[in-house]
Image: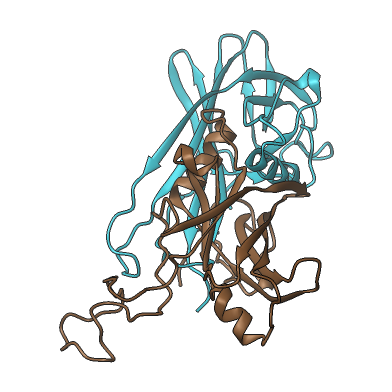
Chain colours: A brown, B cyan
Amino acid sequence: MGVVIIGRTPTPCVLGTIATELCVPDGEPFGKIVQPNMMTDRGIAQLLGLFAGTESTTFTHMQIGTGGRVVAGEEIPNPKFNSSLPESDNNRRHLPVGTVKPITPDREALYAFSDEEVAIRTVNGANARFVARFEIPVDVPVNEAGIFAGSVGTSPLMLNVATFIDTVQRIRMTKATPTTDTIWFNVTWDVAFERYPFDRGYQEVESSV
Amino acid sequence: MKRDGTGRSRPVQMGVPASGVVGEQVGVVGELTVRHIRGGQVIFEETDRNLITTSGLSQFAKLAIGESNLGAFYIQIGTGGVNPSNPNAILEPNANDTALIDFYAEGETVRTIRETPAVGIPGTTTYVPYSVTARMAYTFDFHETVRIPEAGLFTALHASNPVMIAHRIFFPREMVDQDFLELVWEIGFSRYPTKG
């Protein structure tokens, strides 16, 4: 893949990684999942606005939601649909129920907001960390999250977003049997400005030099 | 890389095709244009890559969470950057640099943001992703003869021990009285595809 880069080798990158886990209150965490996120267009523009001093609102809040998967009655276009072929089980016009909804860089909000917290924010080197704990009902399928520049009532700007296996399913998968009606959902989100990302499985870029 | 002082600049690209998928890298990319003006004429112009320092990357993280509100507010120029034993050889900036080698002058930048909307359909070869670039500019005027081979992007005035965000050493410009040196720094975020 021919890629032209700017900046002395290697080019720094912004990489977002979200770690989610469940935890019975005051118990041991379980079902931890670590995965990359999607940095949104508006999010990176806001970051650069902070850098240039044209913006002043920083990223403070974390939201979780329940709309990350297709539910019955929803018609979400299938990005892999081939209109030149007949529609079939292997070539669906719309994503089937239960499918993780696609995430694109132009996203500006979660599909279905559920809850938010002010994140605990720290910087270590060039890594910005956002940590939040949500107390969620055990029967509410949380499956999406995002970092925002303000609380939900202010229509805040979204920096990044991720969808994941919902919490109800994760409880089932781990065969955990919560004895309470609620469970803790812990999120640790790292936004790293890294110079050497390649050892994390990301593609090595080519220099134009 | 051509660094022979002929004014030739390499073609650069601030936005490249991307897949628009989760986990793709967003590159932090920067370049500096050096424009030497004498008698109202541009006698030298060169655009080349910069080095974003480690402290500059950390500054991005601090800005994101609100630990700092200082961005790329100042450009400094310096007289260091040339190999003392060979005046025709220039040094390379280092990721751990925190200051110019030899400070000469500074100016507060004029800053703008340029956004370029995505064009086309994600996943196709003609797709051009959304990109955003910050432009920081300052023009220095000179009243003496001096040789300028380096520039840096800083968060604050030199006297306040600012964070150096980016550094570039270029083929020295011989400035004389009434000359101008226009520096235009562009730093942007650009998506590019992930493995697989």
A101 versus A124 height, above or below: below
Q: Position of residue B183 (x, y in %)?
A: 55, 27
Q: Specify the quadrant of the image occupied by residue B80.
A: top right
Residue sitting nearer the eye, A53 or A62? A62
Q: Specify the quadrant of the image occupied by residue A102.
A: bottom left
Residue sitting nearer the eye, A106 or A120? A120
Residue drawn at the location 81% of the way across and 66% of the way down: A26
Q: Is residue B55 left or right of residue A118?
A: right
Q: Which residue is situated farthest in the bottom direction here?
A: A89
Q: Position of residue A191 (x, y in %)?
A: 64, 55
Residue B182 visible to an observer of this rendering:
no
Residue drawn at the location 71% of the way across and 76% of the way down: A179
Q: Which residue is situated farthest in the front direction here?
A: A180
Q: Is residue A202 left or right of residue A114?
A: right
B66 versus B73 height, above or below: below
B195 versus B154 height, above or below: below
